[in-house]
Image: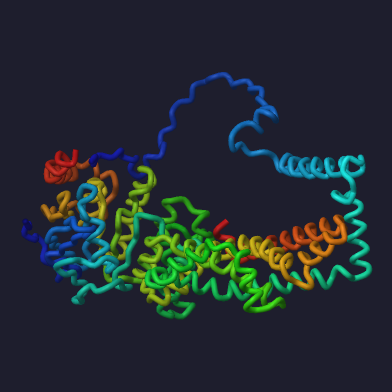
Amino acid sequence: MRFDKTFAPADGGSGATTLPRAAAAPTPPRPKRRRGFVDVALTPRAAISPRATLIAGLVVWAIVLGIWSALTYGGVMPDIFLPSPSAVIERGISMVSDGTIWPNMWSSIEVILLGFAISSVVAVPLGLLMGTFRIVQAALEPMVNFIRYLPVTAFVPLFILWIGLGLSQRVAIIIFGTFFQQLVMIMDGVRAVPDDMLNASYTLGSSRRDVLTHVILPAAKPGIIDTLRITMGWAWTYLVVAELVAADSGLGYMSMQAMRGFQVDKIFLAIGIIGILGLITDSFFRLLRAKTAGWAA
Amino acid sequence: METPMTQTSGAPLLEARSVELRYNSGNSSVLALDRVSLEVREKEFAVIVGPSGCGKSSLLYLAAGLLESTGGEIIVGGDHVDGPGRDRGMVFQAYTLFPWLTVAENIEFGLKRRRMPAAERKEIVNYYLNEVGLAQFGGHYPKQLSGGMKQRVAIARALANDPKVLLMDEPFGALDSQTRATMQKLLLRVWDHSHKTVLFVTHDIDEAIILGDRVHVMTARPGRMKATVDIDIPRPRSLDMMLDPDFIAIKRQILGLLHDEIDEDH
């Protein structure tokens, strides 16, 4: 244990006397050494320019699209297995113009939004309670952790038996797939709020209720939004699982039908639309986080 | 052991009576605080020094009502401490500003909890922003501030709530030595204005002497009160008083009290 400390200069000790400057000749401007692009790029964690970031991303897209084009237009792959990019785009245009795409798209969006909303409306408050009150955590965590590892797909037959083949069956699969994950992730986020932050608020006169509403809730908000964003991605996966097995509409159903008719371009189109819709929901939650919890950066 | 009190101005505002704190883990138990008694008078700046692990921070958490003792009692303003309350403000070693609130909103947090009118809140917030030299930073968020600035806001936030006693748990412990000196200067100035009753915990003897009216020296594991030293260096104080013979004599005395504790530690 050491008790000595270095003395910082007492008041006014900040260079009141100016040392005589050595009358050195002005140093000639040193040639600025420019580090090469490769040198920078191969340095761990070194920052790269925004332009390089953009180009690097575009190059990978170009390579993937290039290989795809080469395989299809070059005739390497028969088009009943791999459609050309233009075939997928043409299929998209025709399905939009004759309107056959919309019922499937809306059906999928409806299932996703319903399932995700029902799951989140329960998981957010319950996750907050689990992260805040040890007794709620002790009661629910063992069961939740068990259910969390059960494969959702294994429940599809059960849900079909119980609920039938309608919309509610697909919604149930989305809920089952997302709810328990949301619960655990939100609980962990709430538990990460530092104890001393709660303590500080108590010493400022907060009641227990104040601590929950004015400290834990705002502190956990960025984490909750992140959880919603990530689990929304998983919900899209479960949606397709539900639609592949048993549905009469939806993008997954559309793929299934297309497979039976060997319409591979249609399968590609369905996958592409899911990707774009997923990207839109992802951007929505990113925007929401930036707007309402910008302090967390 | 206790040294007789030299000044008897005012009744104790904070009193610890034979406080014991025992941690139980499994079938072994560790005694952290062993019958610690302490008196802090109104408008007094009291400091606790002791080696790390002596339980001095625990004593502060007990006074704040954030920990429960296993024996003895703590009385603040005539009332037994039973849970936290706004009469005992606290500044923590860790940064505890609310990152989603601006500096001004952090300072008015406690005022809002007791529904003080906005105009009154604003006046108090502005006063304390000035007091800690952050008048230009009311609209900033904590992540935009340096460590020293964050602790200044934490001090302003605690004082704005007008507690009976201000508990400070090594508030400058995480700061570099120059920032710490600046903060000590600032705290001396703020205290000269407010004369708030303070209980300050530190392991830095210089800090203890330059800030305190009385310094309570604790022993290491289990934490016991070893002695109380009156600091009769006149106020207002400045940091260059650390070079005065009076200061050095007191420092020698406290170092002597701590000496065997340090030897035991290593």
Please tell me whether residue A262 is drawn above or below residue B177 in the rendered image.
below
Q: Work out whether residue B168 or residue A190 is closer to the camera in this orientation and state it.
A: A190
Question: Does A122 sit above or below residue B25?
Answer: below
Picture coordinates of residue A276 (x, y %)?
A: 77, 59
| Percent x, y of residue A60 | 76, 42
Q: Split into 4 quadrants, where in the image is the N terminus of chain A? A: top left
Q: Is residue A8 visible?
A: yes
Q: Residue at x 23, y 58 (%)?
A: B26
Q: Which of A282 and A161 is in front in this view?
A: A161
Whether residue B101 appears in this view of the structure is: no
Q: In this view, does A245 lie to the left or right of B84?
A: right
Q: Residue at x 34, y 58 (%)?
A: B92
Residue A178: name its quadrant. bottom right
Q: x, y (%) of residue B256?
A: 12, 42
- Location of the C terminus of chain A by quadrant is bottom right
* Rendered image quadrant of residue B249: top left
Quadrant position of residue A73: top right
Number of numbered discs overlaid on the protein picture: 0
